[in-house]
Image (tube, rainbow, N blue to C red):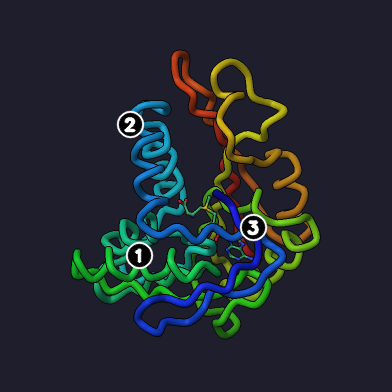
Amino acid sequence: MHSFMRHLHGSSGEAPTQETKGLVLDEGWRYDLMGWFHDTFSFRGNWHKLRQRTINLARMQPEEQVLDVGCGTGTLAIEVQSRVGRAGRVAGIDPGAQQIARARAKAARRHVPVEFQVGVIEQLPFPDQSFDVVFSTLMMHHLPKSLKRQGLAEIARVLKPGGRLVIADFTRKQDRQGWAARFHAGGSSIQDLVALVSDAGFERVETEEMRPPRFSAFPGAGIVRADKS
Ligand SMILES: C[S@@+](CC[C@H](N)C(=O)[O-])C[C@H]1O[C@@H](n2cnc3c(N)ncnc32)[C@H](O)[C@@H]1O
């Protein structure tokens, strides 16, 4: 299901999938279908809960500027738009052309003005100090370590002074137990993320853990929240 460095072209002449050392998902509606299936039958709604908690931790205000890096099919970015209102701005980037096409279609259907574009964390297509908040959900485990460092430096560049970073990821595979250990998707060590975020110059680094509930295959998750100095 995963594919590296694909060069697919959207059917409507959209930008092709962008090359990266990260693990690109380019599944469009299939990603949403898989997510719905897992969350409904295996995770018992915990993926949705993780997304809500991640959004709440950013404590967004109306009119703020928000970026979702590795936005996939745009579910979080579309939800966030209602927190910042029409005077705010929400952007999402992902290297997968099909992910971005699906995100745009969902936003258009809901009449939500989110800017989705094909792009990569290693070179964010935005000027310095553009955003109040940057999210990265379930994507850090898609990057090799050197790219995590490079990507966090890029996030620091596009955040305004005092801007907030919120990263969420599944618990890494070797730390899972029970049913959760069978779930195939990767994850991150929260301690590693804290070290990387601190090395990138962020301050007030806080963490939260979402433990795997009993009788669920949800792998557990960690959230890191930090401020740009
Ligand atoms: C598991 S998905 C998570 C998508 C979404 N954030 C969510 O929570 O559903 C990970 C995403 O990271 C993207 N990705 C991989 N390499 C990337 C890179 N270099 N820059 C930005 N995103 C990348 C993939 O294409 C994929 O859509």
Choose top left, top right, bottom left or bottom right for residue 73: bottom left
What residue is pinned by disc 2?
A: 40
> Residue at horizontal 53%, vertical 62%?
70
| Identity, as a three-letter code, of the amino acid under mark 1 | Arg
Rendered location of residue 161, percent (x, y): 59, 72
| Identity, as a three-letter code, of the amino acid under mark 3 | Leu
Above or below: residue 11 compared with residue 77: below
- Please say if the residues under marks 2 and 1 sit with CB atoms less than 8 Å apart: no
| Identity, as a three-letter code, of the amino acid under mark 2 | Thr
Closer-to-camera residue (196/122): 122
> Residue at horizontal 75%, vertical 56%?
144
What residue is pinned by disc 3?
A: 23
Query: Would you say residue 223 is visible in this rendering?
Result: yes
- Marks 1 and 3, how far apart at CA: 18 Å
- Please say if the residues under marks 1 and 3 sit with CB atoms less than 8 Å apart: no
Chain-order first, disc 3 or disc 2:
3
Rendered location of residue 122, percent (x, y): 68, 72
